[in-house]
Amino acid sequence: QSVLTQPPSTSGTPGQTVTISCSGSPSNIGTNNVFWYQQLPGAAPKLLIYRNHQRPSGVPDRFSGSRSGTSASLAISGLRSEDEADYYCSAWDDSVSGLLFGGGTKLTVL
Amino acid sequence: EEQLVESGGGLVQPGGSLRLSCTASGFTLSSYTMNWVRQAPGKGLEWVSYISSWSSVIYYADSVKGRIIVSRDNAKNLLSLQMSSLSPEDTGIYYCARETTLELWGQGTLVTVSS
């Protein structure tokens, strides 16, 4: 059971905006940076957002992240078919001295 | 091009051991902390271990503590994961990834624990 809680699935139509939530606790999201990863089918995960809202070079600005208190969210605007993937949040947890992942959210583009 | 390549996966019987390797190229391994992350078939990501740049700080997930040893040889640009007392629950793809940001991932190596 993941300590970071994400919805198992979400969906949207092309052009829409979808938001994926990630809920944690004071010892992880409440204290440390949140990261988001995209995993396309059959591929290794890829860093999408770091330090809560920063985008690595090459990641489109359609992807945005935010953090508030013990929760974080990933927003994907202008949804495209190639965005169909699994999305994971992560944050370091000071109480267990380890990196936690959310259970992952499967995004379906209808 | 910066790259991480895992190797050493395979089929092992329950109770057996396996040593995974992660070879870095295109960058200097000693400048970065490293992590191992695994993914059971059809499941989510699970962090396994962290090792600091010069091995002074090491962390393990509770699920593997006592059964896994992470190490690195910066001179060889090599990260290793020695696994023992393996169980079917350890089956999955094992990835090495750079920094706590996991900014760079390898393609993974598959470990299957089965009789």
Image (tube, helix red, strand yellow):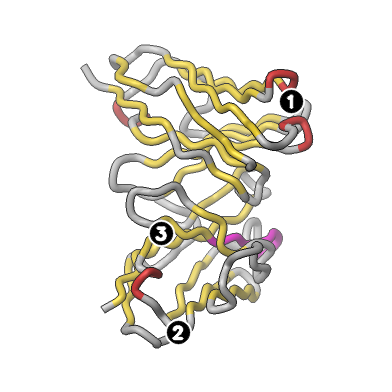
The amino acid pointed to by label 1 is: Ser
- Asked whether B41 falls inside the magenta stretch, the response is no
* On-image quarter of the C terminus of chain B: top left
| Distance Cα–Cα, label 2 vs label 3 | 21 Å
Q: Which residues are magenta?
A: A30-36
Q: For label 2, count other residues whose C-alpha is less than 10 Å away and answer few (under 14), some (14-19) or many (20+).
A: few
Q: Residue furthest front?
A: B1
Q: What residue is disc 3 on?
A: A104
Would residue B106 appear left or right of A96 to someone viewing this image? left
The amino acid pointed to by label 3 is: Gly
Q: What residue is disc 1 on?
A: B55
Q: What residue is disc 2 on?
A: A78
The one nearer the camera, A48 or B67, is A48
Counting from the top left corner in percent of width and height, residue B92 is at: 35, 34
- Secondary structure at badge 2 equals loop
| Distance Cα–Cα, label 3 vs label 1 | 30 Å
- Secondary structure at badge 1 equals loop
| Distance Cα–Cα, label 2 vs label 1 | 43 Å
The one nearer the camera, B79 or B92, is B79
Mark 2 touching mark 1, by CB under 8 A?
no
Q: Residue furthest left?
A: B115
Residue B61 appears in the rendering: no
Would residue B66 appear left or right of B109 to someone viewing this image? right
Q: Residue at x 65, y 62 (%)?
A: A56
Counting from the top left corner in percent of width and height, residue A100 is at: 54, 50
Image quarter of residue B76: top right
Q: For label 3, count other residues whose C-alpha is less than 10 Å away and answer few (under 14), some (14-19) or many (20+).
A: many
The chain under label 2 reads: A
Q: Residue at x 61, y 25 (%)?
A: B79
The one nearer the camera, A71 or B38, is B38
The amino acid pointed to by label 2 is: Gly
Mark 2 vs mark 3, foreground winner is 2
